[in-house]
């Protein structure tokens, strides 16, 4: 069995990672929980055992960890991940720090596997994850020429602070995290704006899709929007295929896509919403229809819990894959 560490164990994603590890009966020799100095000393119960959260320091990275699940922000990861790697651990990082590094694998287990050229593995953006799983299946069968995203992202994508902005806004409080109120509002602005008018979040989705699907020439565009929903992101995907097909064939293909649940029967008002996805690990797809404005183009509506499959679950699934390889 392995020695596992969780960095950012008191955060929203870190706590969910621990829940998933417990729910999936993942075996380990030791489990060490790290946080910033502010949260150090807190107690968390996992599998009936009380763990005291430790402050992450450089000295701690030299301990004999096999796997480190990192969910503590980009700057923390840039500093500490190479130190863990140098000490022999495999780091699965949930920040954006390493995603576009050519030497680092960017992994969604249903789509690709870690090559372990380096012992740092990047977890993609939450909205990217729920998009590339169905897109990979379409790419394998029909080929994909172009993708246009519009996201509707819940406040939990910003962690506890985003949730507090929404709940505080309900009480008339001014926003502390977002540039504008999120209560009774939508904000077409996630992360910083770039010189080309896109935001960093939109750029992430574009470049990550190209990297994960192993197609740097794939035409991708995105608009990312924050909405007043607590949990689960929705993504409207407009995809142009290389080969001709029809809606019936498209649905049949998606029914066989791993982790995808097709909810698509407009006549009975069956389509996925964030309430359907919250707390679950699947990717729900509906509103599948042809776009008559472009050849071989279709609309998909993808909904998934951003803390589950969009972050914590994807990281733990990467861990499970690595553990199974170790057993083999």
Image (cartoon, rainbow, N blue to C red):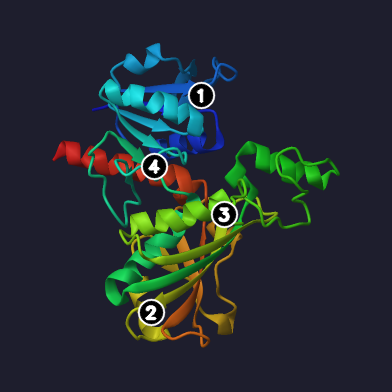
Tell me the residue at 47%/20% (across/down): 50
Q: Position of residue 2 (x, y in %)?
A: 26, 27
* Residue beneath disc 4: 315
Give the mark, 1 or 2, whose residue is nearer the N terminus.
1
- Of the residues under marks 4 and 3, which one precedes in the sequence? 3
Residue tagged 2: 250
* Quarter of the figure with residue 244: bottom left
Element type where label 4 sits in the image: helix
Q: In x, y percent, where is residue 145? A: 38, 73
Q: Residue 44 carries which label?
A: 1
The secondary element bearing badge 3 is classed as: loop
Compare marks 4 and 2 and give the one earlier in the sequence.
Answer: 2
| Sequence-wise first label, 1 or 4 | 1
In the rendered view, tell whether residue 46 sits above or below residue 41: below
User: Mark 1, residues whose alpha carbon is within 10 Å: few (<14), some, or many (≥20)?
Assistant: some
| Callout 4 touching callout 3 (CB < 8 Å) | no
Q: In which quarter of the image is the C terminus?
A: top left
Label 4 neighbour load within 10 Å: few <14, some 14-19, many 20+ = many
- The label nearer to you, 1 versus 2, is 2
Badge 1 marks a residue whose secondary structure is strand
Residue at image mark 3: 232
| Frontmost residue, 213 versus 319 | 213
- Asked if disc 3 and disc 2 are in contact, CB closer than 8 Å, the reply is no
């Amino acid at each position: 069995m392995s020695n596992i560490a969780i960095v950012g164990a008191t955060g929203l994603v870190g706590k969910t990672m621990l829940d998933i590890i417990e729910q999936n009966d993942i075996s380990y020799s030791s489990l060490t929980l790290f946080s910033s100095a502010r949260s150090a000393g807190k107690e968390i119960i996992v599998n009936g055992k009380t763990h005291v959260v430790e402050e992450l320091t450089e000295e701690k990275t030299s301990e004999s960890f096999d796997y480190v699940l990192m969910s503590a922000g980009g700057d923390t990861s840039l500093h500490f991940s190479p130190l863990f790697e140098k000490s022999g651990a495999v780091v699965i990082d949930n920040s954006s720090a390493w995603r576009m590094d050519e030497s680092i694998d960017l992994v969604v287990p249903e789509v690709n596997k870690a090559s372990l050229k380096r012992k740092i593995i990047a977890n993609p953006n939450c909205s990217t994850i729920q998009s590339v799983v169905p897109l990979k299946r379409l790419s394998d069968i029909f080929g994909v020429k172009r993708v246009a995203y519009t996201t509707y992202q819940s406040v939990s994508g910003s962690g506890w602070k985003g949730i507090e902005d929404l709940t505080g806004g309900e009480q008339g409080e001014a926003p502390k995290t977002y540039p504008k109120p999120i209560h009774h509002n939508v904000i077409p602005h996630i992360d910083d704006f770039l010189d080309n008018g896109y935001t960093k979040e939109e750029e992430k989705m574009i470049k990550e899709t190209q990297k994960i699907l192993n197609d740097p020439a794939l035409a991708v565009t995105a608009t990312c929007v924050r909405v007043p929903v607590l949990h689960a992101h929705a993504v409207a995907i407009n995809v142009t295929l290389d080969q001709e097909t029809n809606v019936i064939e498209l649905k049949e293909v998606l029914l066989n896509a791993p982790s995808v649940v097709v909810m698509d029967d407009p006549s009975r008002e069956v389509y996925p919403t964030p309430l359907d996805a919250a707390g679950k690990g699947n990717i729900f797809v509906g509103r599948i229809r042809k776009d008559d404005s472009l050849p071989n183009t279709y609309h998909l509506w993808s909904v998934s819990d951003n803390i589950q499959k969009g972050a914590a679950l994807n990281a733990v699934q990467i861990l499970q894959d690595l553990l199974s390889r170790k057993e083999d």
